[in-house]
Amino acid sequence: MTGRAGGRRATPQEIGARMKGERRVLLAVHENPDGDALGSIVAAGLVMEQLGVAWTGFVPGREPFPPELTWLPRLGDLVRGELPEAGDATLYTLDCASAARFGGEGVGAQFWVNIDHHPDNPLYGDFNLVDAGASSTTQILHGVLRAADLPLNAEIGTCLYVGVVTDTGRFQFSNTTPQAHRMAADLQDLGVDVHEVYRHVYENVPIAKVRLNRRAFENLRLLLDGRLAVSVLSVKDFRETGAEPGYTEGVIDGIRTIAGVRVAALVRERLTPTGTPELRVSLRSTDGKIDVSDIAHTWGGGGHVRAAGYTFHGRTEEGIAQLEREVAARQ
Ligand SMILES: [Mn+2]
């Protein structure tokens, strides 16, 4: 699905005004949610609560959330699995590069608001607030709250902060803009405890995740003279370390630190219910010169220039060989 008939770009003020007038909303984010997705959906839910708007939050899939994020408020209220009927509720999708990413193609929403920062977002909503220059979706939300004078307190601010601190790699990645720092300063002024967030997100790692990380380094392959680093995590690696699927969050950030690496890839093997092999591939471009979202598009995935992902249907060696060819063709 591309745009809806009559769909258009909307300003933060327009989105904020619409939020104030809502009676019921359905909030949704993408499958395998990261800190930005969960921070966005929970922050938006808390804002709705303050406005007296009834809200339902939906996260596709049934896999547990990444352990470093389970302390966020209201996660237990989020609906998993099947997308609920929108009914008369306005649908807000957050951090979703495409309608397919939250499983919502054809969802019966009367009005659809699309808030995102992925450059390849096709503006599928009735209102689209898509800013590829924003470091995180929570930064765009913060802009909406400030532009329309919507409720913002330390609890909401903490959720917004989690999105920006994780999506910018703790204010280190190339998307760390002055605006990201200004937002962080504003949130700190509201009472967000940044060290407490750091403790929760980065010093609360389950030992099984540390072991999984070690496996990722043990399984590392340097290809194309060290310019492509690929690590494979097999079903066996998860079983033997006791790690859950959500434990891979951030593992690729270790792989990308290796000197000389221009593209880092983390390949997770999965078996579909029918028993056919499937790979979830995450990609990072370290210097930004190789557009990994372009590579991800080859297999129907997407993302940003420097961070993207896709699903490969086939065997691991074939998937890696094809990835190697695509990277080689772009350097
Ligand atoms: Mn994001």
Image (tube, rainbow, N blue to C red):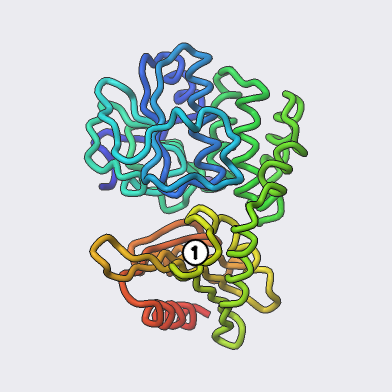
Task: Residue at 27% x, 67% y: name it.
Answer: 275
Residue 182 spot, x, y in % from top left: 72, 36
Residue 34 spot, x, y in % from top left: 52, 47
283 lies above or below 331: above
214 lies above or below 190: below
Task: Residue at 45% x, 23% y: name it.
Answer: 14
Task: Residue at 52% x, 35% y: name it.
Answer: 40
Labels in figure, total: 1
Dot 1 alpha-carbon crowd within 10 angstroms: few under 14, some 14 to 19, many 20 or more: many
Residue 123 spot, x, y in % from top left: 36, 43
Residue found at the very far bottom of the displayed protein: 225
Residue 86 location, quadrant: top left
Give the labeled residue for mark 1.
238
Residue 317 location, quadrant: bottom left
Task: Residue at 56% x, 44% y: name it.
Answer: 35
Query: Who is closer to the viewer here, 62 or 251?
Result: 62
- The answer to whether 143 appears left or right of 200 in the picture is left
Q: Secondary structure at mark 1?
A: helix
Query: Who is closer to the viewer here, 310 or 63?
Result: 63
223 lies above or below 40: below
Observer able to see residue 291:
no
Identify which amino acid the numbered label 1 is placed on.
Answer: Phe
274 lies above or below 56: below
